Image (cartoon, helix red, strand yellow):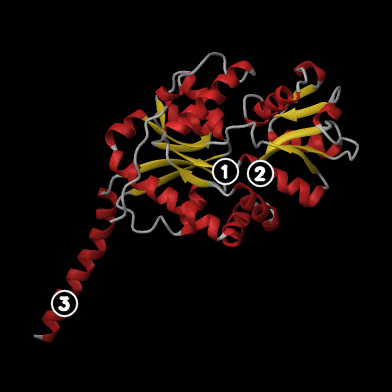
Amino acid sequence: MTVTLSRRRLGAAAAGLFAAPALAQALPVLRIGNQKGGLRSLIEASGVGRDLPYRIEWSEFPAAAPLLEALNAGALDLGYQGDLAFLTVFAAGAPLRGIGVARPSPAGQGILVRDDRVRNLADLRGKRIAGNRGGWGHYLIRAALKREGIAPEEVQVTFLPPTDALLAFRSGAVDAWAVWEPYISVEVLQFGARTLLDGRGLTPSIMVVSAHEQAIRDKRPQLADFLRRFAAGWDWARDHISDYAHTNSGLTRIPEAALARAYAIEATAAVPLDAALVREFQVAADQAVEFGLLREAVDVRRALEPIAPAVAG
């Protein structure tokens, strides 16, 4: 009898082992685009990705532009990128909506200089400023010039992606660089740069969780659950800066001290996609048209479809 019972138990255990992968395959799937050191590391390092009622299929991208191309094509359900990149693609007709947002402090954007003789923005008249076209760097340059009453043609703006701008700035080929964290902290801590001004009062600094329209229709409960975990992940990250910096340093090879400094400055938090935020976002979108980042006006409300985070059960 003992032998027979053991065999039955072994058979049941084996059946369970074979059934587990089948059950996992039967779960709904969220296809999420990730940039190294971004959304995936937040979810995994914080531990909020445990016990998911769905599977996540992660796809890696080097930057926001190709991620948004994949989202536009329907190859992804979900992505995460800056406000201006999101608006640019939406304005071009992409079938996506912003379903949630996080806010790093605008202090995480800035114009860097190395020359001690440059004490304010006016000292950059006639000099070269690098920034990424159509992104936060471009916006920050124009917004700062407008605030200080300096005409755009009084400076030489050189549009470069961050990797090229970094080399130009360190070599002295440009006199200033409009960029964001953690590039700022790397330059300040390791290469003697100084933040001439930051984005407070100038830039929107909104990170958008964007979803394809099909996913919003078909996977709304999963999206709501993911937004809850997303918010909890940022709560964890603000309270565990050194742990989060250590994890992302291993992924990105960015020095841990620079990441810790960057995360402390940004203090990113998930926030409600409420009426006040929409109004602020609209002001930024209108200025983006004035500054030449967007070709035409965008009704921000049409670009957004807030999904309330699921309540933990």
Horizontal side of residue 86 vs 184, given as left or right: left
Whole-Å distance between the Cαs marked 2 and 3?
60 Å
> Could you tell me the amino acid type at mark 1?
Pro
Considering every residue shown, the one lying at the far right of the view is 117
Label 3 SS: helix
> Which of the 4 image quarters holds residue 248?
bottom right
Q: Residue furthest bottom?
A: 2
Tell me if residue 14 comes above or below residue 313 in the rendering: below
Q: Quadrant of residue 124 in the image?
A: top right
- Of the numbered discs in the image, which one, if any, rests on residue 181? 2
Is label 2 or label 1 in front? 1
Residue at 68%, 26% in the rendered image: 143
Image coords of residue 259 (percent x, y) = 65, 53
Q: Amino acid at mark 3?
A: Arg
Badge 3 is on which residue? 7
Q: In the rendered view, does 36 fall on the left or right side of 262?
A: left
Cβ–Cβ under 8 Å for marks 2 and 1: yes
